[in-house]
């Protein structure tokens, strides 16, 4: 905690003031707080998001002064822009050439890349010219992300009090409830006794504090019905304690690693996430319960987590508005009729600031993906194989980071995804046990899978290839021989993991959780979504659609003049970037044998303008869903492949540890 006591300490409970009002909260709510119950009205959730993350990584790596405008370049596009550069009007939608004109002093640092034959990624001066032969590596940012996550965890009490969810490469959610519960009891001893007469519904004594000191927090204005003179209740105090914890964490990240971040503190993830984006950079926003309605009323509901993508579009089409204020006037029944009961209910609650999703303290990597979109498409097996080498090297180096060489963890399955036209095909194989995992093993397996795709026919031209490993298992540390994995690695398990992966591709099962370790190129424009309960419609197709910033790699502008490994001329225009499927919390399992997300229940197409209080002010409805790029039209075939004999291991040179390799290209 910060050393300054932010509010008056309370008097002992033995001396209650006769005029003291009761709290709105009861003893049972305190108990719920200690257990981080998602329905607890005293709950405190924080969301921390790094400012201009990749740009900060480059600034820190290269020791660039903070006021220097800098953008991170990927081919001819910009994927991260620091705040000094934003003052010149730079954004992710302009090209590097346009950026240069707007801000002649701009440093443009190209992301690190893999290139054929390399053992590791590197920063290269000429990457921007070599989109066709190189592939982006996000490793430098992943490594920084890990350091930041570790710093955050160190600053918190150990589990189970600590609940940290890595939400993307540059964000986390923290459930601070249990920690705040223990601080409350220390600071307010009158709360520590049992409920009078053992009745948990007894109201708590009201806090004696009349004014809270919010330090430098951005405080959201109160709802119309509230005034700052209303005495604080325990929810205000809990959120203040949360804000102190978060401020200290942010200070620690700054002091140790020199990164600035922004944060939101509120009673749930939905509000915390909106809060962190409210004041940037380097600020934290507190959304007190008494300010929620006011806070939300200024937003388009498409800014709300999980409402930014297809679901948001559906709601816009259904209700003819995209503002929270107007959606509040739409009856629950209408939303349920148009969106289905569960989704309708979820949307109804969301615009009222209700969100009971939990902070899921998973931080272990479950899968890794390496991918490349080809423009122009590639047309030959050998070209594909060359990319598979790069993917295998990329994935293997990340596996090494995960401790495969020490048998700490090990993936069970390898998956290849191949896109030809509208068709995505996936093949997978168990990774053979016995012996250390090697890059060569991954590569040979991948090549076998690609050979099968080719044997199936119609493999070319191929617009996208990706390789992923999944089903990570903990290994036996200290038992580095074959035995460790012979014992643990029953074939059944591998096949099960592989089945799950395939089922996920087909959209008929809960996929393995995303872990933010995928990597693919993708269009610059995208929507951020990550449902808490993702019924992940498909592993591959949806990853493309749903990946959040943890693994974003915006797709470059197509550049016709660039050399290519392929001899193809035709470059099929890739589909516009799809968004994540609606959260449908908690309904919907897709039955479509498609690589595209499950279609939503068809909403009514006609905007329900008469339902709105002020239809005249409604923006026009979005284009009808039938034009939406995300409705499924892809066909996916998936095969499981068992490789009867593991290929021989031809060991390549062990890669060195991944040390940044600095170059800053400055184009003036
Ligand atoms: P964001 O958190 O969305 O953005 P940011 O950190 O750059 O800036 P802000 O201060 O507004 O939070 O994304 C985190 C990183 O993810 C970003 O630095 C680069 C990467 N990214 C892409 O590669 N492509 C994208 O389209 C987006 C949105 C992000
Ligand atoms: Ca960010
Ligand atoms: Ca982010």
Image: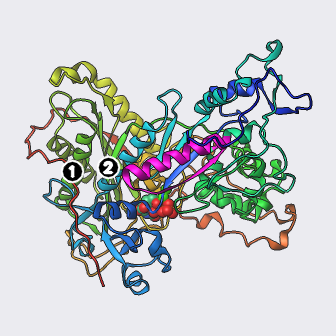
Look at mark 2 in the image and give the residue it sits on: 143
Look at mark 1 in the image and give the residue it sits on: 658
Circle 2: element type: helix
Residue extent of the magenta highlight? 239-268
Residue 173, horizontal then vertical, whole percent: 53, 44
Above or below for 78 versus 289: below
Question: Horizontally, is 336 left or right of 126 in the view?
Answer: right
Residues tagged 2 and 1 counted as in contact (Cβ below 8 A)? yes
Snapshot quadrant of residue 24? top right
Residue 414, horizontal then vertical, whole percent: 28, 41
Residue 597 visible to an observer of this rendering:
no
Instruction: State the quadrant of the N terminus.
Output: top right
Above or below for 626 versus 469: below
Circle 1: element type: loop
Principal SS element in the magenta part? Answer: helix
Please name the residue shown 76% across and 60% down the image: 297
Please name the residue shown 35% across and 51% down the image: 144
């Amino acid at each position: 905690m910060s050393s300054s006591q932010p509010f008056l300490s309370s008097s002992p409970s033995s001396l209650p003031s006769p005029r003291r009002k009761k709290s709105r909260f009861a003893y049972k709510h305190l108990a719920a707080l200690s257990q981080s119950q998602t329905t607890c009205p005293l709950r405190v959730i924080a969301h921390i998001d790094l400012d201009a993350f990749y740009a900060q990584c480059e600034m820190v790596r290269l020791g660039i002064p903070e006021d220097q405008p800098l953008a991170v370049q990927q081919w001819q596009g910009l994927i991260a822009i620091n705040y000094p550069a934003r003052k010149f009007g730079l954004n992710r939608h302009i090209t590097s050439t346009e950026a240069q004109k707007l801000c002649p002093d701009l440093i443009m640092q190209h992301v690190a890349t893999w290139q054929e034959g390399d053992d590791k990624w590197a920063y290269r001066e000429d990457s921007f010219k070599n989109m066709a032969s190189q592939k982006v590596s996000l490793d430098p940012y992943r490594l920084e992300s890990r350091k930041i996550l570790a710093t955050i965890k160190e600053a918190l009490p150990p589990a189970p009090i600590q609940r940290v969810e890595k939400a993307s490469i540059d964000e986390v959610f923290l459930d601070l409830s249990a920690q705040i519960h223990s601080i409350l009891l220390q600071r307010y001893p009158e709360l520590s006794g049992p409920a009078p007469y053992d009745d948990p519904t007894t109201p708590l004594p009201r806090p004696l504090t009349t004014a809270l000191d919010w330090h430098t927090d951005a405080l959201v204005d109160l709802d119309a019905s509230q005034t700052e003179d209303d005495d604080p209740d325990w929810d205000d105090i809990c959120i203040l304690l949360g804000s102190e914890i978060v401020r200290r964490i942010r200070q620690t990240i700054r002091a140790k690693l020199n990164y600035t971040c922004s944060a939101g503190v509120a009673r749930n993830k939905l509000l915390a996430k909106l809060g962190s984006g409210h004041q940037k950079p380097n600020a934290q926003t507190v959304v007190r319960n008494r300010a929620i309605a006011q806070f939300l009323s200024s937003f388009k509901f498409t800014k709300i987590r999980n409402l930014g993508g297809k679901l948001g579009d559906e709601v816009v089409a259904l209700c003819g508005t995209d503002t929270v204020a107007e959606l509040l006037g739409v009856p629950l029944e209408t939303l349920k009729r148009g969106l289905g009961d569960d989704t309708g209910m979820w949307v109804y609650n969301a615009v009222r600031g209700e969100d009971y999703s939990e902070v899921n303290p998973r931080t272990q990597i479950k899968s890794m993906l390496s991918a490349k979109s080809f423009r122009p498409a590639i047309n030959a097996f050998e070209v594909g194989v060359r990319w598979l080498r790069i993917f295998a090297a990329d994935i293997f180096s990340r596996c090494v980071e995960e401790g495969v060489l020490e048998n700490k963890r090990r993936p069970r399955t390898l998956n290849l995804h191949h896109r030809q036209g509208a068709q995505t095909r996936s093949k997978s194989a168990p990774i053979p046990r016995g012996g250390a995992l090697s890059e060569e093993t991954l590569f040979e397996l991948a090549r076998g899978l690609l050979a099968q795709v080719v044997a199936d026919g119609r493999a070319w031209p191929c617009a996208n290839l990706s390789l992923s490993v999944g089903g990570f298992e903990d290994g036996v540390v200290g038992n580095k021989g074959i035995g460790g994995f012979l014992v643990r690695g029953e074939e059944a398990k591998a096949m099960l993991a592989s089945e799950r992966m395939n089922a996920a591709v087909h959209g008929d099962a809960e996929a393995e959780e995303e872990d933010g370790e995928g990597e693919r190129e993708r269009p610059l424009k995208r929507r951020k979504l990550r449902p808490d309960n993702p019924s992940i419609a498909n592993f591959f197709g949806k990853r493309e659609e749903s990946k959040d910033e943890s693994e974003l790699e915006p797709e470059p502008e197509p550049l016709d003049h660039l050399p290519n490994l392929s001899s193809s001329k035709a470059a099929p225009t890739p589909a516009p970037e799809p968004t994540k499927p609606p959260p449908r919390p908690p309904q919907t399992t897709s039955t479509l044998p498609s690589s595209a997300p499950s279609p939503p229940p068809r909403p009514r197409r006609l905007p329900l303008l008469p339902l709105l209080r002020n239809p005249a002010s409604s923006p026009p409805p979005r284009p009808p869903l039938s034009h939406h790029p995300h409705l499924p039209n892809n066909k996916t075939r998936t095969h499981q492949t068992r490789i009867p004999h593991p290929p021989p291991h031809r060991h390549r040179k062990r890669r060195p540890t991944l040390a940044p390799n600095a170059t800053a290209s400055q184009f003036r």
